[in-house]
Amino acid sequence: MKKINVCICIFLGAFFFLSLPALPGQTPGQAIKNERTQWFQDAKFGLFIHWGVYSMLGREEWVRQLCQIPLPEYQYYVDHFNPTLYNPDEWVRLAKEAGVKYIVITSKHHDGFCLFDSKYTDYDIMRSEYGKDALGMLVEACRKQQMPLGFYYSIMDWSHPDYLPRRPWETDRPTRDADFNRYMDYAINQLQELMTKYDPAILWFDGEWEHSNEDQRAKEIGEMLLKMKPNLLINDRLFKREPGFGDFGTPENFIPATGVRNPDGSPRLWEACTTMNFNGWGYNRYETEFHSASQLIRQLIEIASKGGNLLLNVGPMPDGTIQPEFSARLKRMGEWLSENGEAIYETTASVFEKLPFFGRCTVKGNKLYVHVMGWPEDKRILLPGLKTFLKKVYLLKNERTLDFRRTRRGIVISLPDRAPDPDATVVVVELQNPPEITPYEIRPTAGGRIELPVYLADLQSEMGQRAYLDHFYRVTMLTNWQNVNDYPSWEFFVEKTGTYEVQASYASMWGGKSTFAVEIDDLEIPGTTQNSPSVYFPKTFTLGTVDLKEGKHALRFKIKSIANNQALRLEKVILKPL
Ligand code: GLC
């Protein structure tokens, strides 16, 4: 008994201080060592499923709030939910085909409807026309196909009589007898029910923003759940996304510029949850915009190169099937992963802080996987500052060996004339020993000119990221720049104090004038877009001058207003000594 208690204490301790602090000299590529979380860290790719009665309305999972639907009217959908074509075995097969290693599904979303048979409420799938435990069926399918399954659970609940506050527009539901603490008893009962009945691998909390940790009894819930299942993983949202809490961070619809760290600077497990489409997580019948499969593959690579997981969402249709836009993209990802999975699964973050070309790196033992996304014009890539002895360099796809040579700046690898896979071609670099790297710094060329291409930038974004890098035959540009919160930033060194001309190379030909600003330290240089030869081909424009002292500086390129859907495609900023 004592032993068990000690174990629980260790697990609980581990829960609150999950990853060990980084040892001095630890490289960014180093793994987080933790037995509980290892499977998750290795998995890299999960499938998120948002499905419930809201799917029937085909206007996202927030539809009840967005369209201000009174509870009695919403009841129609609760009563008539009937996914006659629902086949959970097929969902899991599709996930497997996509190369997905775990699934997380909404057991209860904000509307409060339970996709499982709950003895604590009638507001569940058993009273809908379907009348079968859809969640239980998925649990079974996952068990058969050995697919770890996690449950999303919303603390916010728009239908439970005890949940407070009501939606601001709800005037017909009195709050007089409501008791939030009694609601939390209900939620805790349901969480226990989910654990004992279905034994999930992950509990993925959400909807936690209306109350404090204390009121939501976060600590009590965390401890209770881990007592029930010590190796259960719990996301950070149970603790209001406080840095360092929960097993993993959950950036939503953006990829953090440099990954996610604990408050003490040590690497943290994280999982970016993202949608393939742009409007909503639940089925949206009216959606017309989807990321391309190529973009999704590159997102997965980028996330893996920063040590994270991708939890990619689908919102199945009300009949229980997954729309072709989603399944086609998942299948293409699976195709890519069937050839290149070695470079994703069980890897750790890149050892390079920056790569001087459009590409990313993942690491496994003494192997570096270099994912080349934009084929360079000179058919060469430089691995900057790599000092370790190289055994062999080859293409993952066909094991064709590639020539390389050591230079003062690092290892230069010669690529074939054409990209074997234009989405991302993986070059495997086999090292004699674990990688040793001199940190990368952006410094002037011999003539004193400083070049800041977008692939050397940290792309800063928050929820709702739109901008990403893409390759346009000869050049890599930051494209799809539709959100003013997305911006590239660089740090660079000036070696000679003086005046510099600030130039930007960008493509823009959409008509209308977008405005932007280049911020260099505290100085702001405003600009208005001008036409380049085409939207695929950039031109260099002079924006102004800046006096820079010898030393380190920061530059950010920000969009101020967007005239025609996207402002510009940025290739690079140049500082030319005058
Ligand atoms: C947000 C939304 C919710 C979605 C979730 C996924 O919190 O409110 O609808 O389920 O993000 O991360």
Image: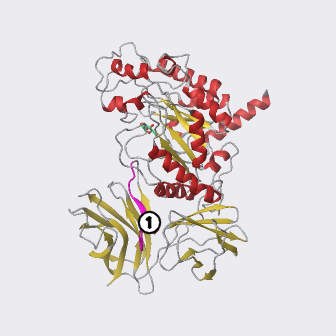
Q: Quadrant of residue 544?
A: bottom left
Range of residues picked out in magenta: 464-475
> Callout 1, which amino acid?
Ala
In percent of width and height, residue 257 lies at 47, 57
Query: Does the magenta-highlighted stretch encompass residue 171?
Result: no
Query: Does the magenta-highlighted stretch encompass residue 467?
Result: yes
In percent of width and height, residue 375 lies at 50, 72
Question: In percent of the image, x 44 and y 47: which residue is there?
Answer: 276
Question: In percent of the image, x 60 and y 35: which residue is there?
Answer: 89
Above or below, 410 against 185 in this view is below
Above or below, 542 against 126 in this view is below
Residue of label 1:
457
Ligand 1 shows up in which quadrant of the image?
A: top left
Would residue 151 be visible to someone looking at this image?
Answer: yes
Q: Nearer the viewer, residue 546 or 121?
A: 121
Q: Is residue 145 left or right of residue 220?
A: right
In terms of secondary structure, where does tag 1 sit? loop
Q: Is residue 463 left or right of residue 45?
A: left
In percent of width and height, residue 548 lies at 35, 76
Q: How many marks?
A: 1
Q: Quadrant of residue 221?
A: top right
